[in-house]
Image (cartoon, rainbow, N blue to C red):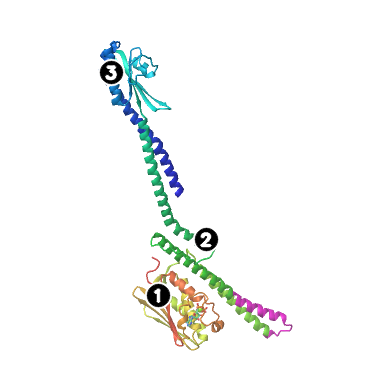
Amino acid sequence: MLSTYLLLILVLFFLLTTLIPQYIVDWQIEYRKNSLQAAGNEIGKRIDYYLGFYDSTIYVTYIDNVTRQYAVSLDSRVMIFDDDGKIISDSNNQFKQQVLDLPQIRDALKGSTTWSNYYFNDIGNVLYLAVPVMIENNVRGGVLIANSINDLYDNVDVINNTIKTIIFIAGILITVGVAIISNHFLKPINKFYPVINKLSMGDFGDRVEVMSNDEFRMLADSFNSMSIKLNEVEQQREDFVGNVSHELKTPLSSIKLLSESLLTQDKVEEKVYKEFLTDINNEVDRLNSIVTELLSLVDLNKKHLVLEYEMTNLNLNIEKILEQLKPFADQKNIRIAFEQSDKVLMRLDKNKIKQAIINIVHNAIVYTPESGVVTVRLYKERDQVVIEIEDTGYGIPKENIDSIFDRFYRVDRARSRHTGGTGLGLSISKQIINLHYGSLTVSSVLGVGSTFYIRLPIQQGV
Ligand SMILES: Nc1ncnc2c1ncn2[C@@H]1O[C@H](COP(=O)(O)OP(=O)(O)O)[C@@H](O)[C@H]1O
Ligand SMILES: [Mg+2]
């Protein structure tokens, strides 16, 4: 950034110090030439009559006086020449009676005014200008004026020096300004690099500290929340992979152990064989349900998941679900009640909602001791439909209640072991309900029971 500015300054400097002075000099020389030409014509008018008589002493003295007078007032050397080009009068008294071979004199004798700029080592720049003196269209002679124009070039030096000074000061100001600006802008930006580098290496969660109170601070703030979010996602991913491996590992180890002990024993009774194989079979079921639930969780998490809405009679559907689960409840002598206060007909992804409800009612049965009651209620509340699933079960400790919707989370691992769950059911249900823009909440009293609430907006998929 700095170098660009400096280059610009150099270009500007070059333009200003060459073009502008040149233009000014040309313009001033033109002006000087015009005034000398006017003076030359004036001299010519005063002496034209006497030019024919230059051998008369009186006339020559007169001409000399005029010459000297103008030499002083014009600050120039003034000479008068006759129609042969011979010098009659010279304010410096040097070339009298001599013929000077100058182009300006030759041109003047042809009737035209010309001028030239000469440079002499000792006296510098001199402007030569000759005007013809005419009487009735005849050239009688001419006036030659030699004027030093060093002053004009001196002016240019002054101008040049002024420009140089201005540019020098501007250069310093710009350099300092650019340094300050780049310090202001680049310093905060530079703070991002190490953190971005770390991010790209997979090291998330670092923060950028920007002290200022401007756009950079806002940028840093959003950057930091992104970094924190990435860190969370990465943490979840690691946990998830860890959990999945762990959950798969447990049944696999059991299967390995059971099959190995069968293989290493020589004579195994058929009864023991059956027993072990039953266990192995159960573990395979368990593996199967983990993988199935994982797959449906992966499906639900797809970015472009589209729900297949269809008009659904919820009363009828819940009845069917409860019927399906009844044999299972009967095993524990658990009674299932269904209280329907309202008829609910709404658009839903029928299969997914069914899966969500089954998971929750199934839990209610699993986590309720024998001879308990599970009550399902369906009613409308303003623009929402509520499905309540209440049980008279073990309840959930307060400190665990927020976690039960997390993947693989199970409150009491020891007891959960023989209930055979995976810890994925509630997170699947919650995901499905969220996709319907609804909510899944729970209230629970330890030792008394739990109630899960599914709330769905009635207007769906429009
Ligand atoms: N109705 C309930 N009563 C008591 N605890 C429950 C109930 N429903 C769920 N839980 C607790 O929440 C945990 C997570 O449930 P879930 O995601 O369905 O996994 P899983 O049933 O496979 O263990 C269960 O392990 C259990 O500890
Ligand atoms: Mg469950």
Closer to the chain start, of discs 3 and 2, is 3
* Whether the residue under disc 1 has CB within 8 Å of ligand 1: no
Q: Check the picture and name the quadrant holding the C terminus.
A: bottom left
Is residue 47 within the magenta segment? no
Report the mark closest to the observer, 1 or 3: 3
Query: Visible in this render: residue 355?
Result: no
Main SS, magenta region, reads helix
Occupied quadrant, residue 434: bottom left
Q: Residue at horizontal 37%, vertical 30%? A: 150
SS under mark 2: helix
Q: Which residue is mark 2?
A: 197
* Whether the residue under disc 2 has CB within 8 Å of ligand 1: no
From the top left corner, tell me how far across and down residue 314 is, in percent: 41, 75
From the top left corner, tell me how far across and down residue 75 is, in percent: 31, 26
439, above or below 190, in the image: below
Toward the right, the furthest residue is 266
Q: Which residue is mark 1?
A: 455
